[in-house]
Image (tube, rainbow, N blue to C red):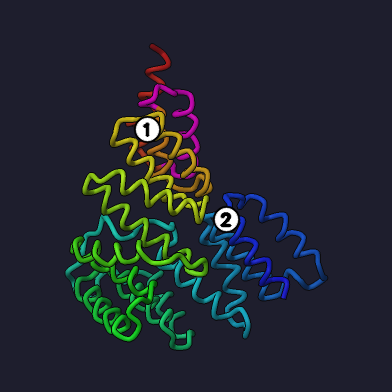
Amino acid sequence: THFKALAKLFQLLRRAGRLPEASKYLASAAKSSPRAALEAGYKYCEGLLHKYMNDPRAALTSLNLARRDGEWGEQAVMLMIEIYLNPENETNWDELQLDERPGGDQSEAVRAAEKLLRELPPSPRQAVLECYTLMAYKSKAQLEKACAKLLELLNVERDYLPALVCLSQAYLMLKQAPKARNHLKRVAKMTFIAEMVDDFERGWLMLSDVYIAGGKYDLAEELCKRCLQSNKSCAKAWEFLGVVKEKEMSYRDAAQHYENAWKYENEASAAVGYKLSFNYLKAKKYVDAIDVCHKVLKQYPDYPKIRKDVLEKARQALRT
């Protein structure tokens, strides 16, 4: 159907860094027939675009209307699970406080993902999504259970990329970085397959993060550039390039990379907005810093850190 072509087009536009063009194609698809906008294929494409544009709530609403469909349901459910487990599309393998209580943080989103998992037929991809769901509880016991399942899966299919990437994340969450690094180095040596672009990207970014933590900035940059070769819209790769430049105290260069990160994730992340405004401040681009602060505070009014660390200092600098 033409919706398959439309979904493919959205993937290609994203990879080319031309995602803003996608909405006009969605609009023409809606006009292609009187009932087009009600079809499951249309709802799937709409949900996919919302996901790419960093609007998880709208994405879930659209995908939910496709999830009972014979042709589109399975893909829609998989995307919904990914969104529930990681709505902000963040690197959710770091900054973890493992919860030692049984069950851990059983949030509504994780429970929703578990419910959706039951709608999927068994497959290696479904097994990996089940492990990501276990890991979302952030309890040591659940993480170890996920590791055991993934190792079992890799015994059958040694080079199954989604399982390798998921296992690496579990090891990072368990603070076992050397184990994660070994698997991620394997991922970095694998031949790129376009259909698995998201898994490759996640693996490369994870390894890049490990390298940044170890001060191996050149290796980290190389992996980020590899991400951007296959997906120019990869906000996280731009952000990591910014982190490297910031650590090297090249604030102007860092700000340029953060500008791209901010643009490609649709100006929706408070953390990226903070980094961008902070580096504008360091690069003495005070008006730009203030402008970004206002955009962040409009979305996140209770974010005192950016007001105190950046906005007040930038205003002060302009006065003097």
Residue lying furthest top in this view?
A: 320
Which residue type does callout 1 highlight?
Phe
Q: Nearer the viewer, residue 182 or 281?
A: 182
Q: Position of residue 39 (x, y in %)?
A: 71, 75
Q: Which mark is residue 278?
A: 1
Residue 300's place in the image compared with 315, above or below, is below
Q: Position of residue 32 (x, y in %)?
A: 81, 67
Q: Is residue 235 left or right of residue 13?
A: left
**The magenta stretch spans residue 46:** no
* Res 241 quadrant in image: top left
Q: Is residue 114 left or right of residue 248?
A: right
Instruction: Please give the range of residues in magenta.
Output: 281-301
Q: Which mark is residue 124?
A: none
Q: Nearer the viewer, residue 242 or 221?
A: 221
The CA distance from mark 1 to mark 2 is: 28 Å
* Residue at numbered disc 2: 14
Q: Nearer the viewer, residue 30 or 123?
A: 123
In terms of secondary structure, where does tag 1 sit?
helix
The residue at 62%/85% (across/down) is 70
Q: On the rendered image, what quadrant is the C terminus found in? A: top left
The residue at 44%/44% (across/down) is 300
In terms of secondary structure, where does tag 2 sit?
helix
How packed mark 1 is, by other alpha carbons closer than 10 Å (few <14, some 14-19, many 20 or more), is many
Tell us which disc is closer to us: 1 or 2.
2
* Mark 1 and mark 2 residues within 8 Å of each other at the beta carbon: no
